[in-house]
Image (spheres, rainbow, N blue to C red):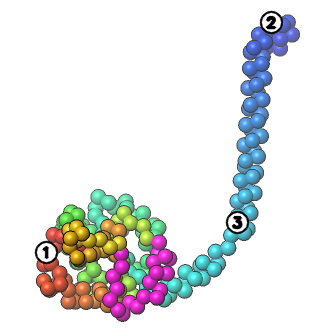
């Protein structure tokens, strides 16, 4: 019908131009898409052929042998999905780990560290979880890192940092902050960002510090 109309010069010229341009654009888009697919495929192939992570894997394997790290993560029932995602990603590179929560769960699993998941009781959760870990594993690990369930740790970088540190000496590393403002001379490492403690520090903290008011406050309602 269209051809008949064109043959009889009854088909509007403007519509003919538009149809021609539309067909041209469709052809260009198809060809451009095919070209992009070919280029992407070739780029990916060149990358795969040139990429060699054997050196990284070898170095990381050696560091993992020399620096044993236990990961302690505080979580809660409402943040269950966070803990699952952590287990699927960076927690795999810990030598061992535990999730401390206000409620015991078998699917993650979690250790019931306290009867309340409120942030103001994070010290109680941390204290009970760390004490449980030390009683169970003793000095099996070199370092113990405490983080929250919204933290991602690059374990390779952490091991590289700790490689020359002595776990048998006092060691406490993290994001340093001042207590109650700049006027107070005391500082601490922020619990949310995470901190790592040496084997000796954990031993003295659990066996000597937690139960003595000279070193630690004797209340669970506090920030860790």
Image height check: is 125 above or below 42?
below
User: Within 10 Å of the Cα at label 1, are there few (<14), some (14-19), or many (20+) other Cα atoms?
Assistant: few
Mark 2 — residue?
Answer: 10
Mark sitting earlier along the chain (1/3): 3
Identify the image quadrant of the C terminus.
Answer: bottom left
Mark sitting earlier along the chain (3/2): 2
> Residue at the location (30% across, 82% down)?
133
Q: Secondary structure at mark 2?
A: loop
Q: Farthest residue in the bottom direction?
A: 168
Mark 3 — residue?
Answer: 48
| Residue 162 part of the magenta-drawn span | yes
Image height check: is 175 above or below 79?
below
Mark sitting earlier along the chain (1/2): 2
Depth order, front residue of 110/157: 157
> Residue at the location (35% across, 92% down)?
169
Mark 1 — residue?
Answer: 219
């Amino acid at each position: 019908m269209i051809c008949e109309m064109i043959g009889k010069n009854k088909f509007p010229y403007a519509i003919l131009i538009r149809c021609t341009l539309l067909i041209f654009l469709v052809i260009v888009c198809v060809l451009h898409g095919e070209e992009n697919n070919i280029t992407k495929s070739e780029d990916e192939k060149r990358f795969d052929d040139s990429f060699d992570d054997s050196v990284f894997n070898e170095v990381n394997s050696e560091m993992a042998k020399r620096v044993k790290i236990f990961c302690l993560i505080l979580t809660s029932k409402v943040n269950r999905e966070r803990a699952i995602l952590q287990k699927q990603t960076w927690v795999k590179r810990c030598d061992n780990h535990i999730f401390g929560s206000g409620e015991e769960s078998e699917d993650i699993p979690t250790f019931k560290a306290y009867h309340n998941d409120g942030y103001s009781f994070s010290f109680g959760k941390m204290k009970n979880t760390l004490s449980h870990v030390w009683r169970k594993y003793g000095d099996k690990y070199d370092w113990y890192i405490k983080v929250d369930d919204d933290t991602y740790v690059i374990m390779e970088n952490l091991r590289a940092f700790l490689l020359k540190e002595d776990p048998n000496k006092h060691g406490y590393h993290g994001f340093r902050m001042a207590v109650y403002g700049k006027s107070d001379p005391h500082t601490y490492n922020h619990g949310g960002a995470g901190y790592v403690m040496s084997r000796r520090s954990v031993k003295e903290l659990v066996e000597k510090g937690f139960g003595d008011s000279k070193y630690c406050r004797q209340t669970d309602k506090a920030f860790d």
